[in-house]
Amino acid sequence: MAEPSLTSLLAQLGRDRVLTVPNLLSLLRLAGVPVFLYLLLVPGGAAWGADVWAIVVLALGGITDWLDGKLARLLGQYSALGALLDPAVDRLYILAALLALGVRDVVPWWAVIALVARDLVLAATLPVLRSRGYGPYQVTYLGKGATFLLLYAFPLLLAAQAQGWFADLARPFAYAFSVWGTALYLYTGALYLAQFVRALRTPVDRAGVAGGPPPED
């Protein structure tokens, strides 16, 4: 058996790192999730502008989401933890916002159920993939785009609940981002499920491709 090269060893060490700048930014975003949820649900929060602060937290989360990916490329600090943590925090922000906006009757419950069910179904497939030697799903550009559309839709939906010219301006954009984000989010969920089906059809002795199930052709 050939000895592993220095390059491959360094790459493996990089993937196993935990304390990296991108991971610290992802943890900072994670800490913002309960703050974001509290601001959306705090009783009487409108009196002191809780919705505005919730939008600020969400905006900071979006900035750090872009920044951790940028720094991972610039600093060469990719890691296995980061590959799991970054999309997981995105899912938590979406879940927190959906549940809170559902409670506040801003988003219809059918949409909340459909979007949450999409993530639950995909999460249920991960142990099966792991048992066949696969890693988690690789995040696609469409999947990332769907996430961004929803994360942009939520603050616009909050702004649209107010009165005045800004609310009137935000309302059509809020509906557009919500409709396109929901449709694309469900569509990419179907694409991930198609990858799952392909992985099930692959013999176990050929499975185990690093980085997730086989992509679509």
Image (tube, rainbow, N blue to C red):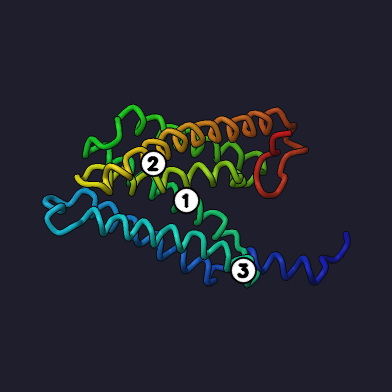
Secondary structure found at label 1 = helix
Local crowd size for mark 2, using a 10 Å CA cut-off: few (<14), some (14–19), many (≥20) = some
Location of residue 207 in the rendering, given as x and y in whole percent from the top left corner: 73, 39
Q: Nearer the viewer, residue 58 or 197?
A: 58
Q: Are marks 2 and 3 in contact (CB under 8 Å)?
A: no
Residue lying furthest right: 2
Location of residue 150 in the rendering, given as x and y in whole percent from the top left corner: 42, 43
Location of residue 85 in the rendering, given as x and y in whole percent from the top left corner: 50, 56
Q: With 30 as the anchor, is 139 left or right in this view?
A: right
On the image, numbered disc 2 is attached to which residue?
173
Tell me: residue 215, above or below residue 36.
Answer: above
Locate the N terminus by quadrant.
Answer: bottom right
Dot 2 or dot 3: first in sequence order is 3
* Residue type for callout 3: Gln
Secondary structure found at label 2 = helix
Q: Residue at x 23, y 54 (%)?
A: 39
Q: Nearer the viewer, mark 2 or mark 3?
A: 2
Locate the C terminus by quadrant.
Answer: top right
Q: With 60 as the anchor, is 200 left or right in this view?
A: right
Q: Residue at x 72, y 45 (%)?
A: 209
Dot 3 or dot 1: first in sequence order is 3
On the image, numbered disc 1 is attached to which residue?
88
* Residue type for callout 1: Ala
Q: Residue at x 62, y 64 (%)?
A: 78
Label 1 vs label 2: CA separation? 26 Å
On the image, numbered disc 3 is attached to which residue?
77
